[in-house]
Image (tube, rainbow, N blue to C red):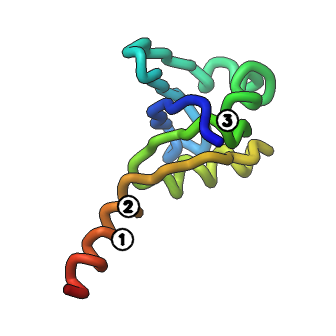
Amino acid sequence: MLTAQIGLDAEGLQLERLGLLQARAWDGAIFLFRTGLDEAMLGTELRPLLEDGRVEKVMHAAAGDARALWTRGIEFWGLYDTAVAHKVAFVQEAAF
């Protein structure tokens, strides 16, 4: 059962490092995690949130971001990818 939702986006993946992780809580609070300066925070402060399946993470076209987290040992759970949702809706609409 979901207990919360957050919006997420990652930047800096083309540089072989996760430079920045941006998060927005549904109450409007915005958080910027400069993981490029201290990538260890992914395994300490952010791991519990990212691996908690009860917290829905809303992202767009999340494959690259999810892969970057996985290669750093983060088991990413609770993902809602708006790009995938759009494709499903498009296919369903085309079927009628």
Instruction: Find the distance from the CA under tag 3 to the CA under tag 2.
Output: 20 Å
For the residue labelled by badge 2, is the local secondary structure a helix, a strand or a loop? helix
Q: Nearer the viewer, mark 3 or mark 1?
A: 1
Q: Position of residue 69 (x, y in %)?
A: 66, 44
Q: Residue at x 56, y 29 (%)?
A: 4
* Label annotation for residue 50: 3
Note whether residue 11 is visible. no
Q: Residue at x 73, y 39 (%)?
A: 51
Instruction: Find the distance from the CA under tag 2 to the CA under tag 1.
Output: 5 Å
Q: Quadrant of the N terminus?
A: top right
Instruction: Compare marks 3 and 1 and give the one earlier in the sequence.
Output: 3
Asked if the residue at tag 1 contacts the one at tag 2, i.e. Cβ–Cβ closer than 8 Å, the answer is yes
| Identity, as a three-letter code, of the amino acid under mark 1 | Val
For the residue labelled by badge 1, is the local secondary structure a helix, a strand or a loop? helix
Q: How many C-alpha atoms fall within 10 Å of the one at disc 1: few (<14), some, or many (≥20)? A: few
Q: Nearer the viewer, mark 3 or mark 2?
A: 2
* Label annotation for residue 85: 2
